[in-house]
Amino acid sequence: MLSIPASRPNAYTGSPLDRAATRREDAAWIAAALTDPGTLFAPVWRSRSLMKGVQEGQPEAVLITGAAAEAMRMAGGPWAFLGLWEGRPVFTVDCSQAEDPLPLLPDAMGSFTDLRAVAGLLPPGEASVLAHARGLMHWRTKHRFCGVCGHGCEARSAGHVMVCSNCRAQHFPRTDPAVIMLVVREGHCLLGHSQRFPNSTMYSTLAGFVEPGESLEEAVRREVLEESGIVVGEVHYHSSQPWPFPSSIMLGFHAEGLSEAITIDETELRDARWFSREEIRNPSAHGFALPRADSIARRLIEDWIAQA
């Protein structure tokens, strides 16, 4: 089985930010940047990002400055330093405590939109910054209390560390690794119809989280066997994709199927089938849909097709 290279970057990658991690501990620099009128803020409201042009099908990220940014910060939610964009500090701030955040902004600034709905239309760098902001703010809002002793935590390192006010345990942003794989055998690929999408016709690659003490290749083989009964041989890395919905990174692979008979795990899948390249090239004619265009699942499929 030949390794299939990634044809282009995945959505949410290619960030234009210099994360400038050394600045996180410089309290004076952070304080000055927070009040600098030229500093940029990527606001997050209930896991949604501020954008304009959504209704017109030409979404753009809206990063705010000055008085608008101060109004968002005064809403009382967490904030964090993301990095430098062409030398300008970039922060994110969560304004979810406001029932309606738009009155805090000047008129015609845009609206808060689910990033997943438009990511394929955003400029790649903007999608990456908004995903970064969304993922970090999710962690901040969900980790207000210490997992060791249950006391409240305080933000440190410009929002990148939560320190327990009682036992002083440090807590860091969490990213869960998940393998996602296209299994191929004799000119066909294995796709499954997830139980999570009962009203959809979408068939997608198999995926699952990496377990403790498990290599990525072992996780690929275990997940495929558990979900479909297919035995996997060679496993080749393709690419990765941040997926902060809420806190994962997808690690993509192509895998060699050594067996053909499918036995599905009905708790995970409604169906699984082997699809030919002809079927994949024209899914609607064969009664199914492929994964969304901004997903690594779609990229794994498209790059396999391109190798024919």
Image (spheres, rainbow, N blue to C red):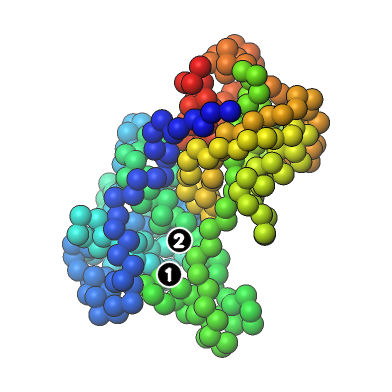
Residue toward you, 180 or 96? 180
At horizontal 66% and vertical 54% (from top left) the residue drawn is 214
Task: Determine which residue is flagged by label 2.
Answer: 136
- Is residue 70 visible in the rendered image? The answer is yes
* Mark seen at residue 51: none
At horizontal 55% and vertical 66% (from top left) the residue drawn is 142
Q: Quadrant of residue 28?
A: bottom left
Task: Please tell me which of labels 2 and 1 falls first in the chain.
Answer: 2
The x, y position of residue 103, in whole percent, is 34, 57
Give the quarter of the figure containing the N terminus: top right
SS for callout 1: loop
* Mark seen at residue 160: 1
Residue toward you, 103 or 271? 271
Q: Quadrant of residue 198?
A: top right
- Is residue 275 visible in the rendered image? The answer is no
The x, y position of residue 53, in whole percent, is 32, 37
Going by the numbered disc 2, the residue's amino acid type is: Leu
Question: Does residue 187 appear to the left or right of 133 in the view shown?
Answer: right
Q: Are marks 2 and 1 in contact (CB under 8 Å)?
A: yes
The x, y position of residue 114, in whole percent, is 46, 45
At horizontal 49% and vertical 30% (from top left) the residue drawn is 4
SS for callout 2: helix
Q: Residues within 10 Å of mark 2 (few under 14, many from 20)?
A: many
The x, y position of residue 136, in whole percent, is 45, 61
Residue 290 against residue 207 in the figure, above or below: above
At horizontal 80% and vertical 36% (from top left) the residue drawn is 266
Q: Quadrant of residue 52?
A: top left
